Amino acid sequence: MANTMVTEAACDLCGAEIRDGSLYCYNCGNAVPAKVAEPEPEKSEITPAPEKVNNRPPLRSAASLRKQRRAYNRQPVEVSWEPKEQTPKLFIFASVTLALGALLLLLIALYLR
């Protein structure tokens, strides 16, 4: 029976599996060093790969993360209303002038129709 050797690349920083041809680790963003092609070992040199020890729980899917409720740290907000001292006279004058101008334009439009 033929022996095959499977090597999985792992991130030096976090230990996550790295896909072939990746430039960065998908888990932590660490740059992956370029690998130099190693010559294949002879059949007599093949040893079984050591089991990978992974202390972290498996990653959850993106769908489960979207469905998860977000925890908000809600804190009470105190709202206080303070009455205005006086309405500016310029604001009242401008509002009345604009309303009369709009009414005048409406009357002219109805007359010319």
Image (cartoon, rainbow, N blue to C red):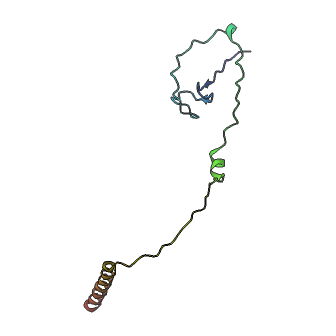
**Residue 106 on image: x %, y %:** 30, 87
Residue name at image x 56 percent, y 31 percent = 25
Query: If the image is split into quadrants, where does the N terminus sit?
Result: top right
Tell me where residue 53 sits by quadrant: top right
Q: Which residue, as the protein is rendered here, is positioned at the far bottom? A: 111
Residue at image position (53%, 19%) is 35
**x then y, percent, for residue 75:** 61, 58
Query: Does residue 21 lie above or below 58 as drawn?
Result: above
Judge from the rendering whether residue 103 lies leftward or rightward of residue 40; answer left or right.
left
Instruction: Name the residue: 29% across, 83% down.
Output: 97
The quadrant in which residue 86 appears is bottom left
Q: Is residue 113 visible?
A: no
Question: Is 57 on the left-hand or right-hand side of 101?
Answer: right
Residue 42 vs residue 8, the one in the foreground:
8
The one of 64 and 95 positioned closer to us in this rendering: 95
Percent from the top left, x then y, of residue 68? 66, 51
The image quarter containing residue 2 is top right
Q: Is residue 47 visible?
A: yes
- Which quadrant would the C terminus be assigned to in this image? bottom left
Tally the marks.
0
Residue occupying image coordinates x 41% and y 76%: 85
Residue lying furthest front: 85
Across and down, in percent, residue 3 comes to 70, 15
Determine whether 75 is above or below 113 in the image: above
Between residue 64 and residue 13, name the one nearer to us.
13
Which residue is more in the foreground, 20 or 103? 103
